[in-house]
Image (tube, grey):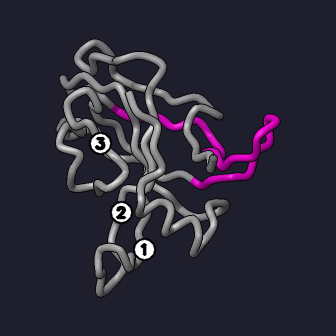
Amino acid sequence: MSRILTDLGEEYAVKNGLVGAGFVIGLYNDGTDSIDDTEDLSDITTEPTGAAYDYQSAVMEADDDGDWHAQADAEISFDTSDSNETVDSYYIAISFQAVDTGDGAPTLHLIAIGALSQSRDLSQIDTLKLALGSVGIKLS
């Protein structure tokens, strides 16, 4: 399972910074999608499809655990009560006008992905929570 800051994420971070902006966080299966740093949100094909599921909003805050990074400022909770996919990763996206894609207007772009602590069969759980400190972006 990958942990990647995408090319679009690098563009966004350099132009805008990562702290305080309104990001969206979603779930998917990287074992199937195999996202690399050149891909965008449309390359994620395994996001849960249940009517109750939706990506969640998050604000990033600066944190220093010996290595500075941006992390979601609260626990993130997904309603998976009517989903049956298996997920192993999360994505971070934000709307901006990317030069790399030639956007004419701000568009929601994939900027980073991260691995969950383990794969989750959503047919077995009604709510999937990502703990404070488990979703973020580290530049290295």
Q: Residue furthest bottom?
A: 104
Look at the image and say whether residue 68 sits in the magenta stretch: yes
Q: Earlier in the sequence, mark 3 or mark 1?
A: 3
21 on left or right of 112 = right
Classify 10 Å Cα crowding around label 2: few (below 14), some (14-19), many (20 and above). many
Q: Report the residue marked by disc 3.
A: 35
Q: Residue at x 48, y 27 (%)?
A: 129
Above or below for 36 versus 80? below
Which is more toward the observer, 80 or 101?
Answer: 101
Badge 3 element? loop
Q: CA distance from mark 3 to mark 1?
A: 20 Å
Q: CA distance from mark 1 to mark 2?
A: 7 Å
Residue 112 image point, x, y percent:
45, 49
Residue 96: image tag: 1
Residue 3: image tag: none
Q: Residue at x 40, y 37 (%)?
A: 90
Q: Report the residue marked by disc 2.
A: 109
Above or below for 128 versus 42? above
Look at the image and say whether residue 38 sits in the magenta stretch: no
> Is the C-beta separation of discs 1 and 2 under 8 Å?
yes
Q: Nearer the viewer, mark 2 or mark 3?
A: 3
Q: CA distance from mark 2 to mark 3?
A: 13 Å
> Is the C-beta separation of discs 3 and 1 under 8 Å?
no
Residue 134 image point, x, y percent:
58, 32
- Quarter of the image with the N terminus is top left
Residue 34 image point, x, y percent:
26, 36
- Region rendered in magenta: 59-79
Q: Residue furthest top?
A: 124
Q: Earlier in the sequence, mark 1 or mark 2?
A: 1
Q: Quadrant of residue 46?
A: top left
Q: What amino acid type should be assigned to the residue bearing mark 1?
A: Phe
